[in-house]
Amino acid sequence: MVPRCKVHERRVMRKWETVDLGIYAKALPLLAKNPVIAVFPLLAALIGIALGFLNGPLFGQLGGFDFGITGLITNLLQGFAFGLAILAAEDAWRSGKARFASTWDEGKRKAGSILLAALGFTFVLFAASLVAGYFGPLGIVLIALVLFFLIYTIPAAAIGGIPGAAALSVSIQKVRGNPLAAAVLCIVALLLYFYLLSLMLPYVVDWTATFAPYVLAAARALVIAYLALVFARQYDEVSFFRRY
């Protein structure tokens, strides 16, 4: 005979080993009411553009943009900005309003954890990219697996305050606990961040080549803000069984 506590535990696991697709729809009107979530990734994108302009004269002898000095700084800024966006998104889910001041204060307290997590994520992805180069087209599978299992790294650092390698480990645990939800989140994130923005690129360049980087930065910030809402809500659900 199975104890009642075990039966209840199995029911809870089945309940949370599902995908709440309603998150993706509810995030849209919530973003419309809280555009402040997009401020953090927008600022990071603008700083990245400025660093790109300075890449040649200041850092050209030290490395390329992608994984040189400016590339590393940009990746850390983007990771920190995404962490701040996730904090603002969680605030929006809980109270209906994302507050810039409180998000910034909490972000400063967790800055070390978020930056270490972003650094760890960047390093693992970079290492996976190097290894994937030896496998040709099949290497994309390795990169996809890294993105899949580490998808909760920044939320773990931002929401949970878990730093560096520990955030990577927590992400793997959360993905293993609910792989279907993580797979859907990963697919949506990749489609929006890469495919949708790449579709916009030719139209933006044709419309205004001069301001194309800034238009794309604004579009990317909105996409990241939307994803932050989805990431924050789903991480709360898979971690704390919390619904708003």
Image: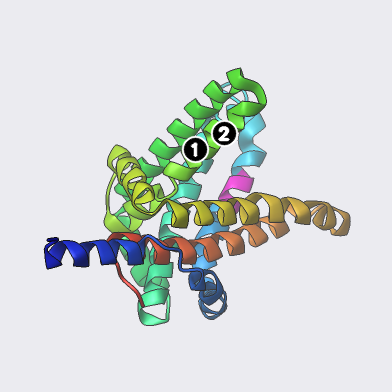
Mark 2, secondary structure of its residue? helix
Identify the amino acid type marked 1: Leu
| Other-residue count near label 1 (Cα within 10 Å), few / some / many at <14 / 14–19 / ≥20 | few
Mark 1, secondary structure of its residue? helix
Quadrant of the rendering where the C terminus is positioned:
bottom left
Q: Which mark is residue 145?
A: 1
* Vertical side of 35 occupied by 84: above or below: above
C-beta proximity under 8 Å, tags 2 and 1: yes
Instruction: Out of 149 and 34, give the one closest to the viewer.
Output: 149
Q: For the magenta stretch, what is the residue range?
A: 45-50
Which residue is the site of mark 2? 141
| Other-residue count near label 2 (Cα within 10 Å), few / some / many at <14 / 14–19 / ≥20 | few
Instruction: Out of 231 and 119, give the one closest to the viewer.
Output: 231
Q: Quadrant of residue 87?
A: bottom left
Give the x, y percent position of residue 172: 35, 43
Q: Residue at x 60, y 64 (%)?
A: 222
